[in-house]
Amino acid sequence: MSDPDPSLWPIAQASAAIAAGRLSPVELVEATLARVETYDGALNSFATLASDHARAAAHRAEAEIRDGRRRGPLHGIPFATKDNYDSAGILTACQSHMRRDHVPTKSAAAIERMEQAGAILIGKCATAEFGTGGPSPGMLFPPARNPWDHQRYTGGSSTGSGAAVGAGLLRVALGSDTGGSVRGPAAFCGAVGLKPTYGLVSRRGVFPLSFSLDHCGPIARSVEDAAITLGGMAGPDPLDPASAMVDAGDYVSQLRTGLRGLRIGYLRSWPAKDPITDPEVMAALDTAAAMFQDLGAMVEEIAFEDEDIFLAVGRTILISEYYAVHQENLLRRPELYERPARERLMVGAFARASDYVDALRVRRRLALAFNNDIMARYDLVLTSSAVRPAWRLDEMPDEPMHMLGLTTYAFNVTGNPAMSLPSGFSSAGLPLSLQIIGRMFDEATVLRAGAAYEEATNWMTRRPALAKAVQAA
């Protein structure tokens, strides 16, 4: 039976209702704003709620659809973005005092594409400062809280996007991923997080963390929601030097075609050999691998170079490029950066040019080896997206991004599409997750496999007890 609150409906269901005249974009936007206003006080998932902007866009969408000018499945659908996406007329602060008054005049390319498809931006979600580091007492906005346990971390750095979608405040929010910043929050908050192939989605207008590792992608409530959204985000952009100039594909039509005939390499060794990996993560991952086989795929365990090499390469590139972006402001106004961001930036100050060049060379070798060896033999690779459930905020590790990137960094280095989705729950009731990696520009197969697994499990039917959490806050 359908939920009476349309803000909880899958995108396809809401879209069909809008097309048939049973639901208006105005009704859907009002329901979504009401849900955010009711529950986000305890979550802090939104940095800025753009209610007036959203209502005006909803009325325009309603008029267009009424006049027979429906643009497609995203027309009238609310979405949010991480607060490092420029949004015309809406504060874009990147969680930093350095940009506390920054209101862009032009939106990021991904927002432009979503709005051209008829989607309605309702606000900007919390983030780590400039996309890195953990929570800090002096942050411009309060840090986002995990909807499954407010005393636990959301994952970073698309913190608010993960929290908002995991809480069911809306169906999709855009994030950016440099070493796992879409997949990590999705993993910790019980959502689907898709990092597309490098260059498939334009990064123009998204504040860079590491321009050669940054990817833009959706955090969504379901695999189908992610597929529909990717169709709205993806496409060539001659103004983004990293754009692959590849058109968006059809990411939806194959979702229900099953797994028969697919070859999946199970990269079990990466999480299994790490001493910090939670046994419940491995148990859920092994169960998922068996389920993929039961669903018709051929699954066999594989080995590849140690993830430590990928981590070293990715971190060297990231800290070098991160410091290059911020060097002038850091030297001029260091007090405007919070301690976690400032300390991480200072690491980049000591990176040598020769180390950066070496990392770029090794990156190329790793990417070629992975794609010419592993991905030539397998359609997909399966591994974990987080090696443990969300940790408590009062137990934050010194390098949270390092821990979050143990099994995700590699695929920013190679550029392959990678998706995190729920694989169960821990004994403490916290989301567990897995990661599916595909061939370059083959998001359709990644999504197809995720949809088959999602349909065979009931993990996505579970929601955090928001009302209870809000009352207790």
Image (spheres, rainbow, N blue to C red):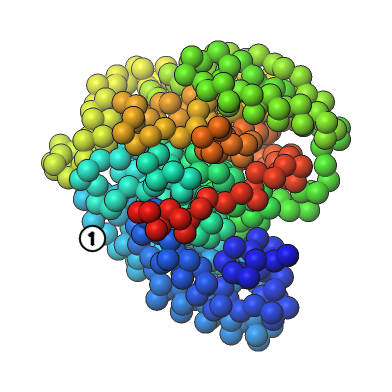
Q: Across the whole image, how many numbered discs are drawn on residues?
A: 1
Percent across and percent down for residue 77 are 58, 67
Quadrant holding the C terminus: bottom left
Which residue does the image show at 58% across and 85% down from the upper left?
63
Q: Nearer the viewer, residue 378 or 281?
A: 281
Percent across and percent down for residue 142 are 29, 51
Which residue does the image show at 65% across and 60% down from the upper left?
10
Q: Residues within 10 Å of mark 1 (few under 14, many from 20)?
A: few
Percent across and percent down for residue 207 are 37, 48
Q: Is residue 183 left or right of residue 22?
A: left
Percent across and percent down for residue 31 are 52, 72
Against 317, is 244 above or below?
A: below
Local secondary structure at mark 1:
loop
Q: Which residue is mark 1?
A: 101
* Residue 352 visible, this orientation: yes
Q: Nearer the viewer, residue 154 or 307?
A: 154
Say which quarter of the image contains residue 14.
bottom right
Quadrant holding the N terminus: bottom right
Q: Nearer the viewer, residue 305 or 298?
A: 298
Against 346, is 152 above or below?
A: below
Which residue does the image show at 23% across and 60% down from the upper left?
101
Q: Check disc 1 and give the amino acid type.
A: Asp
Which residue does the image show at 69% across and 79% down from the upper left?
22
Q: Is residue 128 left or right of residue 230?
A: left
* Residue 124 visible, this orientation: no
Say which quarter of the image contains residue 392.
top left
Against 287, is 442 above or below?
A: below
